[in-house]
Image: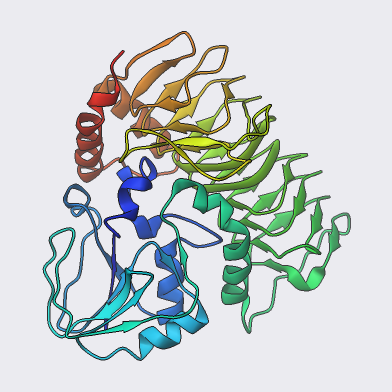
Amino acid sequence: MNLILFDDPEARPHLLPLTFTRPVSLVRVGIFTIAEKWEHYLNLTGSFLTDTYLSGKFSVKNTQDNILINGAVCPTEALLKVIEGLKKGQALFGGGKLIAGRTNGKISTTYPFLYKWEQQAEYQGEITVIDRLWKIFRENDEQLRLDFELITRDRTSAPIEDPYTMTYGNEQIFLEEGVSIKAAIINAEGGPVYIGKNVLIQEGAILRGPVAICEGSHVNMNAKIRPATTIGPYSRAGGEINNVVIFGYSNKGHEGFLGNAVIGEWCNIGADTNNSNLKNNYAEVRLWDYPSRRFGNTGLQFCGLIMADHTKCGINSMFNTGTVIGVGANIYGSGFPRNFIPSFSWGGASGFSSFRLSKFYEIAENVMGRRHIALTDEDRKILSHIFEVTREFRKF
């Protein structure tokens, strides 16, 4: 069988600006991206059926026998059993939404794809669907616990050899090979702590589970990593971080508070930057929603910052409750900028201008080059497309 993860056409626009640069299933929640979760459960390598402008980078493999999975749906053992039992031509729905299907022949690879199912079944169990931005950090606690069980099953943790590191709840602490820890405090009594390959945890850092520090990341001195936080691969973490998901390759290495937030890839957060995650009047937080072109209700009292890929902010930046920043923005200056900052914006509370695309490429090449990763021609095509489709929001 061949695994295809398709973008839910209802979920994808509501997950902008994070899905401007990736398929829905490459959203990270828990230890893994949604795609990686399904690949682990099914023991298959997936491909992606996504928006046309992304298809050059995230291509689809199409065979006569495909298992299609909704890229916004997180797997469970119960759901897996039902999907593995699907017959050719049979689809599985839940709550009116297509969860999965097994094809009887090739499919159309246009997005959104169309396929005439020969038979339909209804899933009666609960499903977790990541179809809104705030669900990424809201669901991160549960997904961390599920992913920890999945990745550590029948495996033995590498030892903590440093005698000055204090640990609590050792049975829920798992280290991959190459981890370096010095004089830290790791408390897994309230939830598991997963530390990936070649992670560096410096002196005085405090981790309180559930927490994941993914491969190649650094936790800086005296960092306070609070529960329901994921630091994605090759990132830097410092200061106070609470219920945050960092997708990967991003730096929040200095003092300052970040809470109830999602940070994409290739972002940099300046020293002493803070975000508010609670209104002074304790009211429900409203968040920018691209499909409706307005701020929408979240039902949440705690909701901080959403920052898409390649965005940077200067030292002492301040972000108000429920701020959404698009792709490739550069934020600096004193005061609180607006709660919705369009992609490729340059400026802050005193005003914005449009980032020149040539200047943006120059910066992106330098940032990615430090990690020995190239900005490819395909990346440029994607970013150029995003620049054009978001132009309507940059009315400066």
Tally of marks: 0
80 and 186: which one is in front? 80
Residue 96 seen anywhere in this rendered image of the structure: yes
Direction from residue 198 to residue 102 in the image, left or right = left
352 and 301: which one is in front? 301
Could you say which quadrant of the image residue 329 lies in?
top left
Q: Residue at x 13, y 73 (%)?
A: 107
Q: Position of residue 350 (x, y in %)?
A: 47, 8
- Quadrant position of the C terminus in the picture: top left
Tell me: residue 389, above or below residue 95: above
Q: Residue at x 41, y 55 (%)?
A: 131
Q: Position of residue 293 (x, y in %)?
A: 32, 33
Tell me: residue 90, above or below residue 59: below
Q: Residue at x 47, y 36 (%)?
A: 287
Tell me: residue 386, above or below residue 152: above
Q: Residue at x 24, y 30 (%)?
A: 387
Q: Position of residue 196 (x, y in %)?
A: 60, 61
- Quadrant position of the N terminus in the picture: bottom left
69 and 230: which one is in front? 69
Tell me: residue 214, above or below residue 158: above
